[in-house]
Amino acid sequence: MKGINLLVICDIMSFTTNVKNEICLLSFSNTENIAELSAFVRSNAKVSNNIVELSTENAKVAKRIYLLIKSIYGVDAIIEQKKIANFSKKKIYIISINSKVQSILNDLSVFNLDGNFIENPRDYMIDSIEDKKAYLRGTFLSKGSINDPKTSQYHLEFGFENKYEAVFVQRLLNEFDMNSKIIVRDTKYMVYIKEAEKISDFLKIISAFKAVLYYENIRIYKEQKNNTNRLNNCEQANMDKIIETCNSQLKDIELIENEMGFDLLNDKIREACLYRKKYPETSLSELSQIISLETNTNITKSGLNHRFRKIRELANRLKK
């Protein structure tokens, strides 16, 4: 592999890179390897002058594809490292196949022996559940990206230049109940999933189990945090409502006291006025319990609320 150390990678890696690196360490059966390689080649290959070029920004993916080609077809591909022609420092790895090209492309359900593109892989390529999972694994290695669950949005997507491959992958994903959808973005067909649980299930499908643990831990933490925030917001809203109600009741009581005093009020209404002034920030439920304890007379929350309605009616009459 022409002097390239494919095991040297950056210390800081994206979640997508971590998932792909984990997959690259796994071993599968020969039929699964063929399905995985078929997916990678179908969504990635550029064919010209009887040479197939495959590309990836991930060194470990490049090594895996090289080894799959060698083990399945006995062909030594050529790997070259190139810099992407822009201001970034990213590198790209080009895997070139220049022997057995026609038979390999036919065997992988990319082109038939007449040189025509095969719109969908032949049935035997995804004959079993495990082969279908392998095909999705190869597709992810080639065209997949996934947001780190720490970010604000859950998102998994595949970008295809070929409409047929996009539709095929969407159909395959939905066989596993992934609820994937397709949108057209610029000149690409994007197959995407936005549901957190479905993305976690996809990671299980492609056997990225370390990534599943990380993903689920972050997702559960975020859900618990969101639930806590919702509860806190709900409690704060309740407190605001209690304070607003108490202030309104105190204003009514102050008006009654200033205009006519408490002597003309009946015992129950006067009692409610005095206890609200004594405990100005307690909820109606707490105030009913306090009155019941201190007067040794049971009064319910609804009963106390009835008294404050009478106080409100009296205050409104005094205002008029």
Image (spheres, helix red, strand yellow):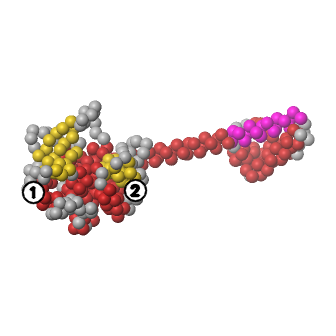
Q: Residue at x 30, y 41 (%)?
A: 14
The residue pinned by badge 2 equals 181
Percent across and percent down for residue 49 are 13, 51
Q: Nearer the viewer, residue 74 or 162?
A: 162
The span shown in magenta is 242-259
Task: Using the image, tell me which numbered label, if any, was put on residue 100.
Answer: 1
Q: Residue at x 31, y 52 (%)?
A: 160
Q: In the image, is residue 205 above or below residue 145?
A: below
Task: Using the image, tell me which numbered label, if any, was put on residue 196.
Answer: none
Q: Is residue 212 rendered to the left or right of residue 33?
A: right
Label 2 amino acid? Answer: Lys
Q: Quadrant of the N terminus?
A: top left
Q: Is residue 25 visible?
A: no
Judged from the image, the secondary structure of the residue bearing numbered disc 1 is loop
Q: In the image, is residue 4 above or below residue 175?
A: above
Q: Residue at x 32, y 53 (%)?
A: 203
Percent across and percent down for residue 162 are 29, 54
Main secondary structure found in the magenta portion: helix
